[in-house]
Image (tube, coloured by chain):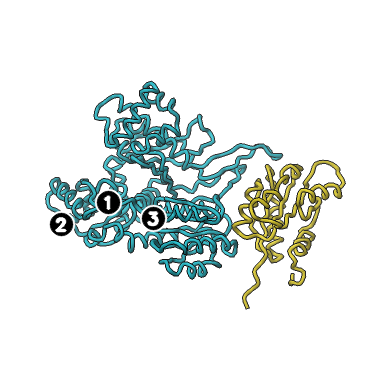
Chain colours: A yellow, B cyan
């Protein structure tokens, strides 16, 4: 029997953000968890995520942001995905996505209103994100 | 003496270079009008008679040729995302020596099909999707192409999952399946496709281009002319066994209709605070500026550089420049012939053709500020560290101050973010031998390299 096709993730750090370490950790964690990962590295624009997702027929886009400007950088991304024909593609975001002490429930609400399926606070482990992705991509029955 | 004949069937001239591979020297060069409508052999014989008038009767052991006659190798390519697989298709086609007469992204439409039919390509390059990625687009495009008359071969080099299915859809066509030009995101694999394109050119195109009679005379290879120049430049840069090259280089060929730029350099970022964006470009890269040329495309130079710049460089009033430029476009065979006004204008036009074409070929750097301080974002190749520039093309060969013209290929403070070479030695191809040396290099790389080093005139360093 042919091996089941792996789910494809497009990942990267959005905006003028050069934090490369977390990005590398996520790349290894997702690959280890059986995903096919297209890693765009740091300083990624919305358009780059979308172009990579189109060519690689990605199942989800995972956006990281560490420098507090995530909310500005992520604005309008869902609309651009719709425009580019990636209707309904799961969008996940995590990191230090906003500045200052804010209740994460509010932050999450705002990102969901922007069209993100999941938003994760600082200090989230890769395992949490992987579990969320498996749920979003309906992989529950598949072996880890 | 061991003479070898090298032929370049150009769109206008059939150019010959006779080489003695034993003495490693050029015996003579000659040119005559290309006679592709009737029999290319005629033009070839005229040129041969001219050559032998200089050198005496020669008994050629081997004879190799390249051709850009009858429009050269004309290709149409389609990919998915413009800056990804379509760009990869473009790089693959240009690097194989083709002229791109149509480049499409996303799904082909009925209008596109009409344009493709009218463009009459020699080869169609069908790509799209990474391996295991999007297959919808390439399958759609294959199905659209299948509705056309199967007048051209199709090279399929997209998502490997869809390759066989594309081939089935295009069963009426002559098809060739190659490895994906972009197998993974950001990874370019264009050599197998380029090899296939050159093979098709050899087997199929020469018949269609009326070159088959000449082909009987040839001992071996026949390739598109730009492909021969590319080989010569690779050899000149990298060297071969027993002879070292001159290192990374940029070469510019300013023609009447187009300006070709070649770069042999890795061009990746060197500094730690530089991030690379976009598709990594091949070590050996060729671009063609279809709107930049000294005669047929002279208006393109003025448009790209601005009338004021031309006027300033030529030291002629703008109105006079406009008049002369219009005149050059009407009389494409006119040469300055000692006329100081035209000499000054040609000097300015050639300088700006080089400036525009090399700027478009080279990468760019953008400065941004992040929480971590100043960061640079690089797109395309960084050629600032390239130390050699080779210039060729009729307009330059006949000019006196070639080094001053070539200097416009260099980095300038007016465009600080354009990553052109900072300081470089200038080499001038006075006798137009680059294509011939590319042909020779397939069998006599050492000889070809030594002749180039000897024949190319060095014009010192420029900053």
Q: Is residue B29 visible?
A: no
SS for dot 1: strand
Disc 1 packing (10 Å; few <14; some 14–19; many ≥20) = many
Q: How far apart are the alpha carbons under marks 3 and 1?
A: 21 Å
The residue pinned by badge 1 equals B9
Kindly state the secondary structure of the residue where label 2 is placed. loop
Mark 3 or 1: the one toward you: 3
Along the line of sight, which residue is nearer the eye, B137 or B99? B137
Q: For this view, does B333 lie left or right of residue B307?
A: left
Disc 3: CA contacts within 10 A as few (<14), some (14-19) or many (>=20)? some
**Above or below: residue B282 compared with residue B221:** above
Chain under disc 3: B
Residue at 43% across, 66% down: B175
Q: Answer with mark 3 or mark 1, whichever residue precedes in sequence.
A: 1
Q: Nearer the viewer, residue B331 or B269?
A: B331
Between the residue at mark 2 and the residue at mark 1, the CA separation in whole angstroms equals 21 Å
Give the quadrant of the C terminus of chain A.
Answer: bottom right
Residue identifier under label 2: B59
- Specify the label residue A49 is tagged with: none
Give the letter of the chain under mark 1: B
Using the image, tell me which numbered label, if any, was put on residue B120.
3
Q: Earlier in the sequence, mark 2 or mark 3?
A: 2
């Amino acid at each position: 029997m042919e091996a089941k096709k792996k789910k494809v993730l497009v990942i990267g750090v959005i905006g003028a953000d050069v934090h490369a370490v977390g990005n590398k950790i996520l790349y290894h964690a997702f690959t280890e968890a059986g995903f096919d990962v297209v890693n765009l590295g740091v300083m990624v624009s919305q358009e780059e995520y979308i172009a990579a997702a189109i060519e690689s027929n990605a199942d989800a886009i995972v956006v990281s942001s560490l420098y507090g400007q995530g909310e500005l950088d992520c604005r309008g991304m869902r609309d651009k995905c719709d425009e580019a024909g990636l209707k309904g593609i799961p969008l996940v975001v995590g990191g230090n996505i906003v500045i200052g002490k804010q209740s994460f429930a509010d932050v999450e609400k705002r990102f969901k209103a922007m069209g993100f399926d999941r938003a994760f606070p600082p200090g989230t482990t890769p395992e949490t994100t992987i579990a969320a992705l498996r749920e979003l991509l309906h992989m529950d029955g598949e072996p880890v | 003496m061991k003479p070898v004949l090298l032929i370049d069937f150009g769109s206008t001239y059939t150019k010959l270079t006779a080489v003695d591979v034993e003495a490693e020297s050029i015996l003579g060069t000659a040119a005559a009008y290309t006679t592709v409508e009737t029999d290319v052999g005629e033009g070839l014989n005229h040129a041969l008679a001219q050559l032998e008038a200089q050198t005496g009767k020669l008994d050629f052991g081997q004879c190799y040729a390249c051709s850009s006659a009858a429009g050269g190798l004309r290709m149409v390519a389609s990919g998915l995302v413009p800056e990804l697989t379509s760009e990869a298709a473009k790089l693959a086609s240009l690097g194989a020596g083709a002229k791109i007469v149509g480049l499409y992204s996303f799904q082909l439409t009925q209008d596109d099909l009409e344009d493709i039919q009218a463009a009459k390509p020699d080869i169609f390059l069908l790509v799209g999707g990474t391996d295991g990625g999007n297959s919808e687009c390439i399958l759609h495009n294959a199905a659209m192409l299948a509705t056309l008359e199967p007048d051209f071969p199709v090279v399929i080099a997209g998502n490997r999952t869809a390759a066989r299915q594309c081939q089935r859809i295009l069963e009426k066509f002559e098809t060739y399946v190659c490895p994906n030009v972009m197998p993974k995101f950001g990874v370019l694999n264009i050599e197998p496709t380029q090899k296939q394109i050159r093979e098709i050119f050899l087997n199929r195109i020469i018949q269609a281009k009326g070159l088959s009679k000449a082909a009987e005379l040839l001992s071996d290879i026949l390739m598109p002319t730009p492909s021969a120049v590319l080989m010569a430049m690779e050899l000149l840069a990298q060297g071969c066994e027993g002879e070292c090259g001159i290192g990374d280089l940029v070469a510019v060929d300013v023609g009447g209709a187009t300006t070709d730029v070649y770069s042999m350099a890795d061009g990746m970022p060197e500094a730690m605070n530089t991030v690379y964006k976009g598709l990594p470009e091949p070590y050996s890269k060729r671009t063609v500026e279809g709107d930049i040329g000294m005669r047929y495309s002279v208006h393109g130079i003025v448009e790209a550089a601005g009338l004021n710049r031309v006027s300033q460089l030529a030291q002629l009033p703008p109105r006079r420049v406009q008049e002369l430029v219009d005149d050059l476009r009407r009389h494409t065979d006119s040469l300055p012939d000692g006329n100081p006004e035209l000499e000054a204008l040609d000097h300015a036009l050639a300088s700006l053709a080089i400036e525009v074409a090399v700027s478009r070929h080279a990468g760019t750097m953008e400065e941004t500020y992040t929480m971590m301080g100043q960061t640079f974002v690089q797109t395309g190749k960084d050629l600032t560290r390239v130390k050699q520039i080779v210039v060729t093309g009729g307009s330059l060969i006949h000019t006196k101050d070639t080094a001053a013209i070539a200097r416009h290929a260099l980095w300038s403070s007016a465009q600080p973010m354009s990553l052109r070479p900072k300081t470089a030695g200038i080499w001038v191809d006075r006798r137009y031998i680059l294509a011939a040396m590319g042909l020779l290099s397939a069998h006599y790389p050492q000889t070809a390299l030594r002749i180039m080093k000897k024949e190319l005139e060095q014009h010192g360093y420029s900053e």
